[in-house]
């Protein structure tokens, strides 16, 4: 993985995987964010994880264009995290430069939200579930913190059946005080307020904390694909 150098050699010196045709050999250039930060990655690595990049590489080849994919709506830090995941199978916020925003739990939560949203865009279900597991582990350790700007980010970029929405709603129902909610409600998306009210009504007298999202119940918040096949306990701890 590199953001500045170019390599025409397939990662590891091996030919492309059988799933990918020879047109995917070499590298692809990704221009991230409005500033178009440049990243160069091996096509077979990125395409192994993402059907979005499979389609992008195929289209560029068919049109006789150089392999460049522009992602103006995805921040460079998010792309950097995703590429690190593609090469290592790990989510590691330490690969980023810690500015004032990312140094806080709020900033780190927001970055994980962006990574989840990007994985959804890239059609990478394994990455989505891995990001969800990281979020749930932070909830377990009580190092999870979300501000209303980040909540709005999720509601602006996900659909109503998003597992990420469910996790945030259950966490909010368990932790938000009446006073805190009253102060924040003016900044929240109306859809979030309605969803949270519905979540609280659905509890029907149950203790809100009973719905607190945990890593142990992570399957509840995973994307199980179109067949909705429930996953095992190790469903997202291994790369497949």
Image (cartoon, grey):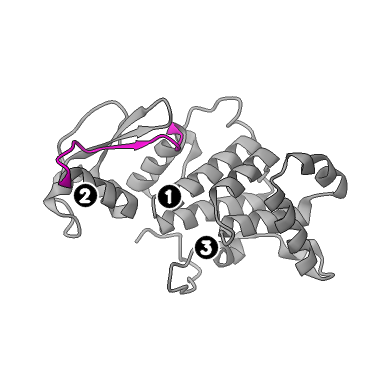
Relative placement, left or right, of 192 versus 31 is right
Q: Residue at x 43, y 74 (%)?
A: 227
Specify the quadrant of the image occupied by residue 102.
top right
Crowding at mark 2 (Cα within 10 Å: few <14, some 14-19, many 20+) = some
The reply to whether residue 156 is visible in this rendering is: yes
The reply to whether residue 14 is visible in this rendering is: no
Name of the residue lying farthest toward the right: 179
Q: Give the residue number, with chain letter if any, for mark 2.
A: 58
Q: Residue at x 17, y 43 (%)?
A: 63
Position of 220 relative to 175 (above/below)? below
Query: Could you tell which of marks 3 and 1 lies nearer the N-terminus?
Result: 1
Q: Residue at x 61, y 66 (%)?
A: 217
Relative placement, left or right, of 92 versus 100 is left
- The magenta span reads 62-76
Q: Report if the CB atoms under discs 2 and 1 are less than 8 Å apart.
A: no
Relative placement, left or right, of 233 versus 165 is left
Crowding at mark 3 (Cα within 10 Å: few <14, some 14-19, many 20+) = many
- Which of discs 3 and 2 lies nearer the camera? The answer is 2
- Which of discs 3 and 1 lies nearer the camera? The answer is 1
Give the secondary structure at mark 3.
loop
The answer for how far apart the CA atoms under marks 3 and 1 are is 16 Å
Q: Would residue 69 be counted in the magenta stretch?
A: yes
The circle on residue 15 is none
Position of 135 relative to 71 (above/below)? below
Q: Would residue 147 be counted in the magenta stretch?
A: no
Magenta segment main secondary structure? loop
The circle on residue 121 is 1
Q: Locate residue 140, reporting x and y percent.
A: 66, 54
Q: Give the residue number, with chain letter if any, for mark 3.
A: 222
Query: Could you tell which of marks 3 and 2 lies nearer the N-terminus?
Result: 2
Q: Residue at x 82, y 65 (%)?
A: 207
């Amino acid at each position: 993985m590199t953001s500045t150098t170019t390599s025409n050699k397939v990662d590891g010196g091996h030919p492309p995987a059988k799933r990918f045709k020879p047109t995917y050999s070499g590298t692809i250039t990704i221009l991230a964010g409005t500033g178009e930060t440049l990243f160069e990655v091996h096509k077979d690595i990125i395409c192994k994880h993402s059907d979005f990049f499979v389609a992008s590489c195929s289209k560029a080849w068919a049109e006789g264009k150089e392999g460049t994919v522009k992602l103006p709506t995805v921040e460079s830090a998010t792309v950097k995290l995703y590429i690190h995941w593609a090469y290592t199978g790990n989510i590691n916020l330490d690969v980023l430069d810690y500015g004032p925003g990312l140094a806080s739990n709020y900033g780190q939560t927001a970055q994980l939200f962006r990574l989840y949203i990007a994985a959804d865009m890239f059609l990478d279900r394994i990455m989505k579930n891995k990001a969800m597991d990281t979020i749930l582990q932070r909830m377990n350790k009580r190092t999870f913190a979300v501000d209303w700007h980040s909540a709005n980010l999720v509601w602006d970029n996900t659909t109503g059946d998003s597992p990420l929405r469910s996790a945030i709603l259950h966490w909010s129902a368990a932790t938000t005080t009446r006073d805190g909610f009253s102060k924040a409600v003016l900044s929240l998306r109306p859809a979030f307020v309605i969803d949270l009210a519905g979540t609280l009504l659905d509890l029907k007298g149950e203790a809100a904390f009973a719905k607190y999202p945990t890593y142990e119940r992570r399957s509840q918040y995973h994307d199980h694909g179109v067949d909705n096949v429930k996953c095992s306990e190790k469903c997202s701890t291994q790369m497949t």
